Amino acid sequence: MAIKHFLQFNDLNRDEFEHVFQRAHWIKNQFKAYQQYWPLQDRTLVMIFEKASTRTRLSFEAGMQQLGGSAIYLNTRDSQLGRGEPVEDAAQVISRMSDIVMIRTFEQEIIERFAANSRVPVINGLTNEYHPCQIMADIFTYIEHRGSIKGKTVAWIGDSNNVCNTWLQAAEVLDFNVHVSTPPGYEVEPERANLYGTDHFEVFADPMDAAEGADLVTTDVWTSMGFEAENEERMRDFADWQVDADMMRVAAKDALFMHCLPAHRGEEVSADVIDGKQSVVWDEAENRLHTQKALMEYLLLGKV
Ligand code: CP
Ligand code: NVA
């Protein structure tokens, strides 16, 4: 089987996601029933982090161990990666000693260069541009709660960041719609989101209009990692882009609320929404584990 990477959401097609979601469901059930499932025995995952993480590290490390393999954590501070070793050289070496690699870094270009020099599959654990593992887990969570996402409307309220770009790509792959509302100056850039067209998203100046009738309302921090210098300015610019109870009221009656976490209550989301009945953020976080286990199984073993 040719090496398959997961660097952007659209690296997998609809059939492949259907397979991964079906496997994630099965793997989750096995895990909940304390059934051992070790298809990746003797396989090694290397995780490279150039930015902080709780969920991504934990879900990949625990996930690989639960599949019978092992995981090694590298960061920029303690490895030669922070001392200017070329990405291409690091990829050659790391991929000769491991079976699969997950990277969290800055520019998408870094992970693309790594993958081009890797002998093993590479997974994007978040870049400035994308966060495909997050949206894979989010859509699996939506399906668990409400069934197919095809034809549904997702409202994205806030920054046109890595998570937003990935929702836009996912809408093209899985055929749903995204209603986006960002403050002026933070608009979606279709080239940065690597979209095929504009059929699957619509832009709204007023966040209330974006949320109206939506099946899922979602948001993320106002300041992503790497953009901390803009924090003060962003606090002012995003003040009207908070998902609160009024906004949830205009969404569909059975609308869900999601947030990739970590969240800032009182900024991008009010406490009553994230801690309220429509919120599925804990399921969403847990499903990072199950969907990424299914993804690693697929990238290493194909359709089992
Ligand atoms: N949602 C997410 O990726 O969380 P971490 O930054 O904690 O990995
Ligand atoms: N957009 C956020 C997501 C964190 C999981 C960031 O990039 O910091």
Image: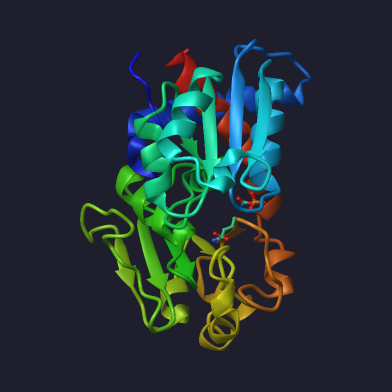
Q: Residue furthest bottom?
A: 236
Where on the picture, by quarter, is residue 267?
Answer: bottom right
Provide residue 97's location: percent of width, then percent of height: 55, 18
* Residue pictured at 37% horizontal, 41% vertical: 112
Q: Is residue 296 above or below residue 131?
A: above
Q: How is the image coloured?
A: rainbow
Q: Quadrant of residue 193?
A: bottom left
99 or 234, which lies in front? 99
Q: Position of residue 94 (x, y in %)?
A: 53, 26
Ligand 2, image quadrant it occupies? bottom right
Side of 78 where 250 appears, left or right? left
Look at the picture and state if 166 lies above or below 253: above
| Vertical side of 16 occupied by 300: above or below | above
Which sits in the foreground, 91 or 204? 91
- How many marks on residues? 0
Report which quarter residue 270 is drawn in: bottom right
- The answer to whether one can see residue 137 in this image is no
Above or below 60: residue 129: below
Residue 40 visible in the snapshot:
yes
Q: Quadrant of the N terminus?
A: top left
The one nearer the camera, 45 or 190, is 45
User: Which residue does the image show at 51% across and 86% down from the upper left?
Assistant: 237
127 with respect to 246 (left or right): left
Name the residue: 73% across, 13% down.
Answer: 36
Q: Is residue 224 left or right of residue 285?
A: left
- The x, y position of residue 215, in whole percent, is 48, 60
Picture coordinates of residue 165 (x, y %)? 40, 58
